[in-house]
Image (tube, helix red, strand yellow):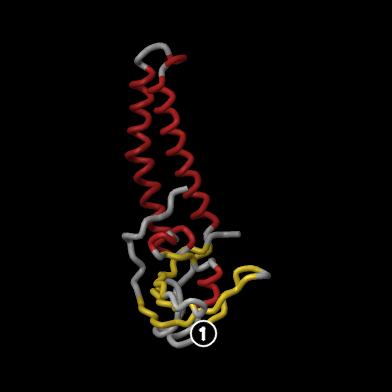
């Protein structure tokens, strides 16, 4: 399945690729060259560490390029007062009355510990299109689901400060 990304996600990924190719690649090659100059490579930890760093950078570049190539570009087409991409939503869990605040983001920006949840998650899929005051059933799997009440929906701009997740 292709990742669903915004144009801003693509732009940030292209910027990271450019930085990795122009800055980090040069640094990594220099580190390998310096470590190689230290002599015996069979017991040279710096050489192996530099090679590993260089290979990780190249792997990240390939990963990002593949994501961009296969991405499905999406836009937020939700109305002002309904839940959609880049909206912040406050929900109350019916079962115990706890309140949580989430921001719906694309898959590569999700970070549940910071309240950023993917539009592909069960709760986001259930909430999309709903409005304040709606009670929504979230079906997690065949045997488990729960209800939430939408307390508040706020527009939040597509924020450049949200990092693209590292894998």
79 vs 102, nearest the viewer = 102
Residue 123 lies, in percent from the top left, at 52, 72
165 vs 79, nearest the viewer = 165
Residue 98 lies, in percent from the top left, at 43, 75
User: Horizontally, is 129 left or right of 99 in the view?
Assistant: right
Res 90 → quadrant? bottom left
On-image quarter of the N terminus: bottom right
Which residue is found at the position 41% from the left and 21% from the top? 45
Residue lying at the far front of the rendered structure: 96
32 vs 108, nearest the viewer = 108
Residue lying at the far bottom of the rendered structure: 133
Is 24 located above or below residue 30 in the figure?
A: below
Secondary structure beneath dot 1 equals strand
Is 20 located above or below residue 165 in the figure?
A: above
> What residue is shown with label 1?
135
160 vs 129, nearest the viewer = 129
Which residue is found at the position 36% from the left and 79% from the top? 154
User: Horizontally, is 157 left or right of 138 in the view?
Assistant: left
User: Horizontally, is 83 left or right of 145 in the view?
Assistant: left
Residue 111 lies, in percent from the top left, at 43, 59
Residue lying at the far top of the rendered structure: 40
């Amino acid at each position: 399945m292709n990742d669903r990304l915004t144009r801003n996600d693509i732009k940030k990924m292209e910027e990271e690729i450019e930085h990795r190719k122009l800055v980090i690649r040069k640094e990594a090659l220099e580190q390998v060259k310096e470590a190689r100059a230290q002599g015996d490579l069979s017991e040279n930890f710096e050489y192996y560490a530099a090679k590993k760093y260089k290979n990780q950078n190249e792997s990240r570049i390939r990963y990002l390029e593949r994501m961009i190539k296969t991405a499905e570009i999406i836009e937020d087409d939700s109305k002002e007062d309904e839940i959609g991409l880049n909206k912040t939503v406050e929900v109350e869990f019916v079962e115990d009355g706890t309140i949580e605040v989430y921001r719906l983001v694309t898959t590569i920006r999700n970070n549940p510990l910071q309240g950023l949840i993917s539009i592909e998650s069960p709760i986001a899929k259930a909430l999309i299109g709903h409005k304040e005051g709606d009670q929504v059933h979230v079906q997690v799997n065949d045997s488990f689901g729960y209800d939430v009440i939408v307390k508040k929906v706020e527009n939040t701009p597509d924020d450049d400060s949200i990092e693209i997740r590292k894998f």
